[in-house]
Amino acid sequence: MLIGPNEQFRRASLTGALEIMCEELELSPTQAKDAKTHYEASGGWLADSTHPALQGISIYVQGSAAIGTTVKPIGRAEHDVDLIARLTMSARGYSPAFVKKLVGDRLKEHLTYERLLVEMCRCWRLDYASKFHLDITPSIPNVDCPYGGELVPDKELSAWKASNPRGYKALFDKRATLAPRFRVSKSAFAADESSRASVEPYPEAMGFKGILRRTVQIAKRHRDVHFSRRPNECAPISVIITTLLSRSYERCVTQRVYDDELEVLTDVIAGMPEFIDFDGRVWSIENETTVGENFAEKWNVYPDRAGSFYAWHKKLLEDVVTLRSIEGLDRIARRLDDAFGERPAEIAIAHIEDAISASRASGTLRYGATGLVAATAATPVAASAAVARNTFFGR
Amino acid sequence: MRRGRALTIAQQFFALRNNPICAGEGQLRREHLIWKFDVRPSDMSRSYRARIELSQKGSPMVFIDGPDLHVLAEGRKLPHVYSDHPPRLCLYLPGAFEWMREHRLDLTIVPWIALWLFYFEEWLWSDDWKGGGMHPGDLEAARRVGREPIAC
């Protein structure tokens, strides 16, 4: 169904507000550059070790920082930047515990790193307070993986387990470049002289910067808020959310046609559960880029986690659908607050308010059938009136 | 400031009736007009029912007939209103030439209603009026420091 111009404008504004929210939540380009400088330096330090097993070690970024889906954690200032310290074949045959210790010992030889170092289950953390955490997980090549995968320690450091961060990133990036098909393009709509849109002020055109990445960030933030209120439940891990969304996204954009970005977002979220395998006994969300990695393996140990996932997913979908339909800036703000937290809601609403106030101050604000619009010189202005200067008075 | 010719009540009425941005219905009496129309201040906003009244003498009076702004405000005192029941909006500074009788209502008051409602919705959530403005006390203060007096 083709939606009318008012609805089209409304959804474009909402998309713009969500976009601003995601920008605020992610690792900024400056922070990312800063993190890169630090992790490259630590990689150099590891590679300069004289221990034969560390010869030729390379360090690279994996996870959300690698694929552009970072979300600031709730309750602390530091983003997590996940790194792989990839050892060469010369490290094969060593146990995960030994390799982890080897990396830790080398980092401790550096005065700065020793001060910043925190030991985690299967990785080492360099804690750059109020900036980011660099979490360094060692890996060795996986000769059994046909896709060039790696082996990383399991949580207990008792065994190596299959993983493929580089292959995962490549597949995610490939899916993210797929563009959805829209029923009618914004430009085609504006060019249609007979449509109402052609004679009304056109709102700031601002879509998502990459729908898949924004969808992942929105879902992850929603998860963080949802589970921060449920301390007794265990949140689905990011890689599950990312995998389900990227698979759903690929299917949605290759098989369907949409009205706008918000509809894509909703449909992609709605399709997530279809990529979870359950044979009545075993839960499985397989890593398509290696052999033998089941992202949902913990669900088989703790079945409550599957239940927590489905309950959260239902709430996420409801919130996104509701956002699309409610009216009133205050109600939208409250819903954003409930779904994504107070600060993101403030940022989204401030973005909308700032646009109107700045346009009012510069004398370019107009009022027409789609409401107040920050008009530009190129804007068609029929059926609208300039908003004259005024001073609200009274108590 | 050069002043134009004051518009008659009938001229104001026909301007309101002919402008699609305030499509609605109203009554024109000899010395009084009433115009009722829907306002959606932004594409994310509710639709509100507004009413403008203007007499041959006196200032335009603007009311919001629905939805009930007091219900939306959940008991908080409404910002920038002259009266509460029904809410009568304060849209411009009296005596400061922002609105004069030669100004068309549909090109001044109507967009200001949208602006007021936009800031109202934002205020409902943030509890902070972002639309700026002045309060009667500000005028008293301005007079005390010797600025040009402004007639209310």
Image (spheres, rainbow, N blue to C red):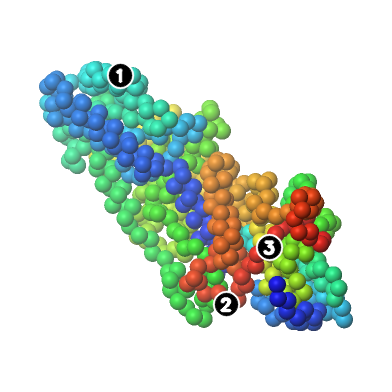
In the image, what residue occupies the spot 70% across and 59% down? A391
The span from disc 1 to disc 2 (Cα, nearest Å) is 67 Å
Give the class, few, some or many, for how many residues have Cα within 10 Å of label 2's Cα (few <14, many ≥20): few
Q: Is residue B100 above or below residue A86?
A: below
- Tag 3: amino acid: Asn
Residue A387 in view: yes
Q: In the rendered image, which residue does mark 1 sit on?
A: A114
**Callout 2: SS:** loop
Residue A390 numbered tag: 3
In the image, what residue occupies the spot 81% across and 62% down? B151
Q: Position of residue B95 (x, y in %)?
A: 78, 64
Tags 2 and 3 on a common chain: yes
Q: Earlier in the sequence, mark 3 or mark 1?
A: 1
Residue A382 numbered tag: 2
Tags 3 and 1 on a common chain: yes
Placement of the C terminus of chain B among the 4 image quadrants: bottom right
- Tag 1: amino acid: Glu
Q: Earlier in the sequence, mark 1 or mark 2?
A: 1
Chain letter for the residue marked with disc 2 in the picture: A
